[in-house]
Amino acid sequence: MIGNEVGGAPYDLVGVGIGPANLSLAALSDPLDGLHTAFFERESAFRWHPGLMIDGAFLQVPFLADLVSLVDPTSHLSFLSYLRARERLYPFYFAEKFHIPRAEYADYCAWVSRRLPNLRFDQAVRAIRWSGADDAFELDVEPGGRVLARNVVLGVGTEPKTPAPLTPFALHSADYLPARDRLVATADVTVVGSGQSGAEVFLDLLRARKAGQGTLRWLTRTPAFAPMEYSKLGLEQFTPDYTRFFHGLDEPTRDRLVPAQWQLHKAISGDTIAEIFDELYQRTVGGGWPDVVLAPGVEVTAATENGGGIELSLRHVQQGGHATVTTDAIVCATGYQERDLGDLLGPLATELDRDAAGRLVVDADYRVGTATRGSLYVQNAERHTHGVGAPDLGLIAWRAATILNSVCGKKVYPLPERTAFTTFGL
């Protein structure tokens, strides 16, 4: 048994997966007296996008979007506490950086994970079911055995998404760093996808490759290599106020809104765009143009092997024209998708409330409706019900506090009534 003896009381709360979302939940639950929690993760230690720790890559949110500060700025697990423990407060103060490197955020999260006694690494949850005899969820944990919990929070994260035509040939950007040296030395490389990850991979390859080596190509279906919405009022769409407003809309309206808001979460930092342009400009000094192709509005419709290379069939979204190019390697920066929970939940999956599209119905407290008496919550699996802010790091502490308030049945963390100057809705 892990944590609860046979016949003993179940955990009050068990988290499945330890990414930033459930790590925030674990950090905020730690000081709550009388709340018995455990969080399980199959990996041996905390890891966050290790394949994308590119030198010079920064978070798109300020450092205050750590695991706890926007709910409890006095927490000993805040980013500032991390800096103090590392004896780096003064260097950070003089650096005057509001946005921190991605690698520093990962190190901060790992630091937090080593200070929480309720985390269980190297232990995978294989199945979750409802036990009527125990009036609790029953989890199969390997190694370990049977675990009972009154409330379960699924924080299993997302998985890389690669377009079907490219699946046999492409490397996803999530695995970029281990393949970087090979890609730097490859003559013809194509990057597909125009979000922040695609821009960072393109920029890194552009800087590392020798002039005259071959073609570096960047393709995207979107009509432009567009900057992310970063105006102060625009960013209020990542507030709890907007999340509540979005959740109150009907399903068809929500489904129309999410793709229309792509510049909130699928575009590129203005700084990264400027760095790319500056690198390209430098290569025109002395005359000539760099060996690169930047092609927005272009969709890859098929891919086949061709004499050791990969032939890509292309269609221009606006012109309707077609073309082919041959490349030696492809990096897909085509985003992530929610994991299929069927194997994990088994028969329980059929008891969950679903919408017209078959997606989970998630209430305002991030709880999924079930036929059981226990409560099952999800993290970063609710974009269709809570909006584009679902994966945003700036909302994870607020979401975790919302879940804890629901689990405890009282406001263990007081949350603000208003968080935006904008009034959403009438």
Image (tube, rainbow, N blue to C red):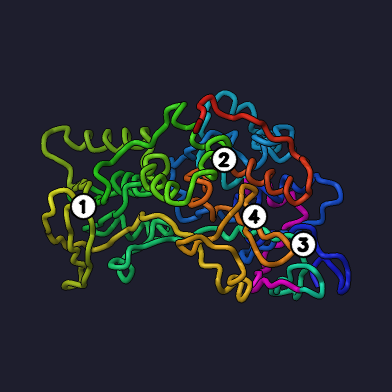
Label 3 SS: loop
Residue that carries the numbered disc 1 in the rendered image? 298
- Would residue 235 appear left or right of 396 to someone viewing this image? left
The alpha-carbon separation of the residues under discs 4 and 2 comes to 14 Å
The one nearer the camera, 100 or 343, is: 343
Residue at x 39% of width, y 42% of height: 261
Residue that carries the numbered disc 2 in the rendered image? 244
Type of amino acid at the residue the image marks with label 4: Arg
Give me the disc on residue 367: 4
Q: Who comes first in sequence, dot 4 or dot 2?
A: 2
Residue that carries the numbered disc 3 in the rendered image? 150
- The magenta-colored residue range is 109-131
The alpha-carbon separation of the residues under discs 4 and 1 comes to 40 Å
Residue 175 rendering spot, x and y as whole percentages: 43, 60
Check disc 1: other Cα within 10 Å, few if <14, some if 14-19, many if 20+.
many
Residue 405 rendering spot, x and y as whole percentages: 74, 45
Q: Who comes first in sequence, dot 2 or dot 3?
A: 3
* Above-or-below relation of 147 to 72: below
Q: Who comes first in sequence, dot 2 or dot 1?
A: 2
Residue at x 68% of width, y 36% of height: 71
Label 1 SS: strand
Q: Where does the N terminus fall, quadrant-wise?
A: bottom right
Q: Find out whether the residues at labels 4 and 3 contact each other: C-beta distance under 8 Å.
A: no
